[in-house]
Amino acid sequence: MVAALVLLACAAPARAERQADRIIVHGDGFTFGVKEPPAWRGDLVHAPRFGAHVLFYQTKHALRGNATLIMVRVSRNAANDAAQDLQSDMDDYRRRFGGVAFRDLAVSHPEYACVAKELAVENLFHEYLTYLSPGRGRTERFAAALNTEAAASAAELEAYRAIVESLVLLEATSAPAP
């Protein structure tokens, strides 16, 4: 969980609106859509506390660190490519957690390039991390993380993959009035 907070730090507050099939998240200079998986709740109110623009959980107990969280944020002005950012994160995890293990993670998106890894320190945390690049010439990058104490269940991984696959960067618009 600590690793996710560092990774997803500095997310600006965002606002959302619900459309028929997705949550539309408005932030400072960006707008994106994401689908809420069945049995999961999208939350923007508590997301900044976790360094995210939108947070997903199945139970509010997750907000106290007792259950799985899925976090999504958008970074702007991404200087490096996603693979370099992932490698940098892995190097940081090696420095901070000597026993960290990295495993390949199969995650895809219908339009965006993805890089992903599972990072684990047994008996401490499992984190599933994905960076998505919307395309050449775009300065935005998505970061998605699933955090659990133990290895994620098949259902948790299915929800995570569904969230990643549903992300879509939209033209930035003004946030709706509260």
Image: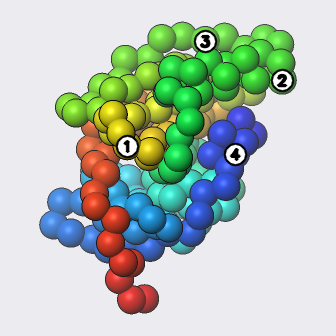
Measuring 47% from the left and 58% from the top, which residue is drawn there? Answer: 54
Instruction: State the residue position of label 4.
Output: 5
Disc number for residue 4:
none
Disc 2 on helix, strand or loop?
helix
Label 4 crowd (10 A; few <14 / some 14-19 / many >=20): some
Residue type at the position of mark 1 = Arg
Alpha carbons under labels 2 and 3: distance apart: 14 Å
Alpha carbons under labels 2 and 1: distance apart: 32 Å
* Tag 2 and tag 1, C-beta contact below 8 Å: no
Residue type at the position of mark 4 = Leu
Measuring 44% from the left and 46% from the top, which residue is drawn there? Answer: 140
Label 2 crowd (10 A; few <14 / some 14-19 / many >=20): few
Residue type at the position of mark 3 = Phe
Label whose residue precedes the other's in the sequence (1 or 3): 3
Instruction: State the residue position of label 3.
Output: 102
Left or right: residue 132 compared with residue 73: left
Instruction: State the residue position of label 1.
Output: 138
Alpha carbons under labels 2 and 4: distance apart: 14 Å
Disc 4 on helix, strand or loop?
helix
Disc 3 on helix, strand or loop?
strand
